[in-house]
Each structure stands twice: as structure tokens, then as C-alpha cells.
Image (tube, rainbow, N blue to C red):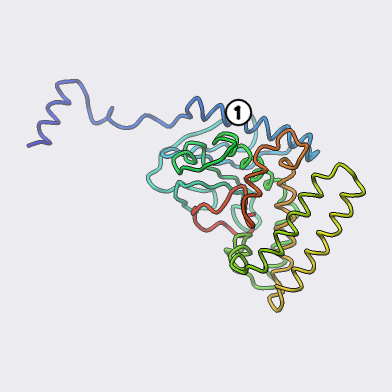
Amino acid sequence: MIGGLAALAMLATGQTAMNLNPAPCALTTSEQSWLDGAFRAWDFVRRKRFHLPEAPRPVIIMFDGHCRYEARPGGPLRWTGETFRDRVRLPNGDLIPPNVTAFAAPAGPGAPVFFVMALPPVWSAAHIQSGLGIDGLTQAVFLHEYSHTRQTYFATPYLAALTRRYHLTDDISDDSLQARFEHDANYVRAYERERDLLYATAASPDRAAARALANQALAMMRSRQARFIGAEAYWKPLDDIFLTMKGLASGPHIPGSPTRAGAGSIRRSPFAKCGAATGSGRKPKGSP
């Protein structure tokens, strides 16, 4: 009866089931503004911090609470939107929940890299806190994680060789390294001392002092690896490659950079990442 009355009411007001469907996906003004600012910041970082030439964009997936937006390589940055139910479709065929996340990953063996990130409204809905504000934090996350899209030329073949040598599983990533050692208090303390030396290196205005600090950090890194890795020899090259990738991607946030916003978020915990552990599900192999 109630359903019949509702149908009559819709007919009386000229409504139909057709126009009760949600409107097609379109970026909000604030989302479009954030994206424009993020890619302007990336262009600055690419040219001024990394000194990289322009290169074709990867497939880019951005999403909010109900829409998935995709930008394809080539030409101006244009977004095509589609709705989703409870999972966001990725170029490699995976489906992830629409949670806070950001990462770059290959779409498959030998396939090009893609990039995926939750838009700021998702971070706000998750009650993420930052002194930078949500827009500042998410831009810092974007710059860090998007930097990884320019690292695949050296990282992908290196990780492929490690996979063959050590028979690594399909879900190996820097999260695997974190999961293995994050509960070892001695390891964490050793890592923190090493990390602090590296930040001091980046902050030092004196080249000779910076070199001395970097040498100390390198010695501590070798000591940490020798002490804790032991028989699990494959962790050392994984530690090397993932720290290299993370360190390079943190370039925009070191002292003296005009895009430093977000450095605090990187340093907030022993294993913190700009794209932090987010509950987004398993990342593809090689995802930094």
C-alpha cells in the first residue's frame, strides 16, 4: 500500500524513477580546485626539485565517497567519472574499498604504472587530523606518492630480479618490511636514530657537515641491516630499494623546499608514510 501511494505521489508531482537516479559523476568545485593545485605543485617539484623532464602521465584514478574519476595518458588532464557501489575499480583489475589511500603501482608484470588516491573529502570523512589542514596534508601525500610514478624505470626491473632470486610472494611491498619489523622495539629505536640523522643531513646548511652526517647514517643503516636481518637475506635489498624510493619521494618535503608542507606528517611515527597504512587492502607487488 505504501509503495502504491509513493508511486501515485511521484506521478502527481511529475517525478519518475528515471529522474530519481543520482546525477552523473562530476567533480565538485573544491575537488577540481584541489586537483588543479596538486598538479601545479607536481609540475613545480618535477622541474625545480627533481630536475626531471616532462613525461607521459600514467593512468590516474581519484575517488570520493561515491564517484571514481579517471584521467588517461596524453593530452590535457581530463577526468571521466563513474559511480561505484562499495569498491573502486583499479587498472589492474583489483577492487578496493573507498578508504583513505594513495599509491602508485604497476598494472601487471611489465605493464605501465598507475596512480590512485582518495580525494580530500574521503580524508575528512575519516577524521584524519593534521596541522596542515586536509588540503595541505593531502597535497603533501599526493606529491610524495605521485613521485613514485617516475621511479619505475629502475625499481621495476630491480624488484623483478629480487622476485626471481628469492621467490618473493605477489604481495611484497614496503608494507611487508614494516609488518616484519615494526614490533621489534630495538629495531625501531635503531631505525629512528638513523632516520633522525638523515633529517639532520637534509637540514644542515653546511655541505661538509651534511656529508659527515650522511656517512654516519649510512654506517648505522649497514649496522641495523647486519644486526636484525640475519638469515632472512632478502630483506636487505628490499630495505635498500624501498628506502631509496621513499627517500627520493620525500625530496619535496625536506627543509628549504617551497613545497615542504607535509614534512611533519612524514616524521610522525617510526614507519610513517605519506600515504600511511589506510586499510585500503593489499597493494600490488612493488608498490612503494
Q: Is residue 89 above or below residue 165?
A: above
Please state if 67 lies on the left or on the right of 210 as rendered.
Answer: left
Q: Nearer the viewer, residue 117 or 81?
A: 117
Specify the farthest residue to the top: 13
Residue placed under numbered mark 1 in the picture: 36
When asked about the image quadrant of residue 19, the answer is: top left
When asked about the image quadrant of residue 1, the answer is: top left
Specify the farthest residue to the right: 208
**Picture coordinates of residue 281, whole percent (x, y):** 49, 56
When asked about the image quadrant of residue 55, the answer is: top right
**Picture coordinates of residue 68, whole percent (x, y):** 47, 39
Q: Residue at x 53, y 38 (%)?
A: 70
Specify the farthest residue to the bottom: 231
Specify the farthest residue to the left: 1
| SS class, disc 1 | helix
Q: Residue at x 18, y 20 (%)?
A: 13
Q: Residue at x 79, y 34 (%)?
A: 48
| Quadrant, the C terminus | bottom right
Q: What amino acid is at disc 1?
A: Asp
Q: Is residue 9 above or below residue 179?
A: above
Q: Residue at x 14, y 30 (%)?
A: 7
**Picture coordinates of residue 69, whole percent (x, y):** 50, 37
**Picture coordinates of residue 242, whole percent (x, y):** 70, 58
